[in-house]
Image: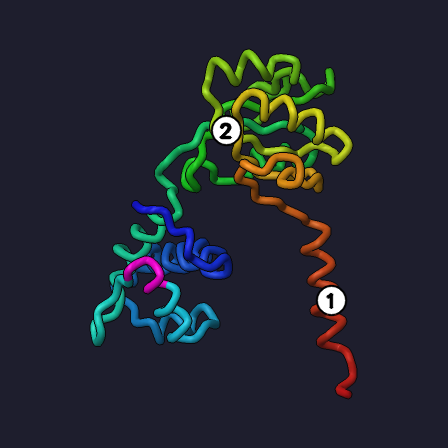
Amino acid sequence: MPKNHHIAAPVIRRLPRYYRFLGDLLENGVKRISSRELSERMGLTASQIRQDLNCFGGFGQQGYGYSVEGLHKEIGSILGLDNRYKSILIGAGNLGKAVAIHMAFETRGFDLIGIFDNDPEKIGERIRELTVSDTAQLESFCQENSIDAAILCVPKSAAPQLADRLYALGIRNYWNFSHYDLSMRFKDIVVENVHLNDSLMILCYKITDRDRPEQ
C-alpha cells in the first residue's frame, strides 16, 4: 500500500474507531451497512464517513452500502494490523503490568516479546507468560531479536537515558507513557504519546463546560 502522507491526522485518529464499530457489527451478524446507518451508530455524519473512507479510495457502492466484513478487513489493512511488529515493554510497575496484561497486542499489529525493569523485586516476575528481565540485558536482547518498537512505562526522569539506549539500538518506534517528549530529542522517530493526565483534564473541562451558565 502506498504511503498516505496527505491524510489528515483527524481522519487517521478515527480509523481505529471505525474498526472497532465494524468489529462489533460483525460479532452481531450484520453483513452490510449504509453510511447513514453507520453514522447513526457512531455519532458522525454520513458525509464525514464517506469523506474519510474516500481518502483511501472508498469502499461502498451507492444504494448498496458497505460490506461490513470487507470494510473491517480493509481498515485493518490500512492500519497495518497484520504486521506483528516485535515489541518490548520497559517498566513493569502497575501501569506497565496493566498495559502488558490487558492490551490485545496480537490483534493490533504487535507482538510483545519482552518486558524489562531495573527493580530487583520485579525482575523474574511472570507477566503475560513473559519473565521480566533486567534492563541491563536490553542491548543483548534487542540485538538478538531485531526489535521494531518499544513501549515506555517508566517515570519521566528515567526516560531520557533509556531513550538514548533504545535509539542507539536502532529502535525508531515508540508507544510512550513516560510524559517525556521523545520527538523533541529524536527527529526521525515514530511516536504515539499517551498522556492519561491530559485525558483526565479534558474530561474535567467537558464536565465543567457543560455545567457553566449560559452567557
Q: Taking 153 as reference, is 69 left or right? A: left
Instruction: Estimate the spatial distance between the alpha carbons at disc 1 and disc 2, rounded to whole Å.
Output: 35 Å
Which amino acid does the dot numbered 1 rest on? Tyr
Q: Taking 83 as reference, is 136 left or right? A: right
Quadrant that contains the N terminus: top left
- Residue position marked by numbered label 2 in the rendering: 87
Residue 160's disc is: none
Q: Taking 139 as reference, is 110 left or right? A: left
**Residue 133, horizontal then vertical, whole percent:** 61, 17
Q: Residue drawn at (61%, 35%), measured in percent from left and top?
A: 186
Q: Residue drawn at (59%, 17%), measured in percent from left and top?
A: 138
Q: Residue drawn at (63%, 21%), measured in percent from left and top?
A: 165
**Residue 92, horizontal then vertical, whole percent:** 66, 28
- Residue position marked by numbered label 1 in the rendering: 205
46 drawn magenta: no
Quadrant in the rendering for residue 191: top right
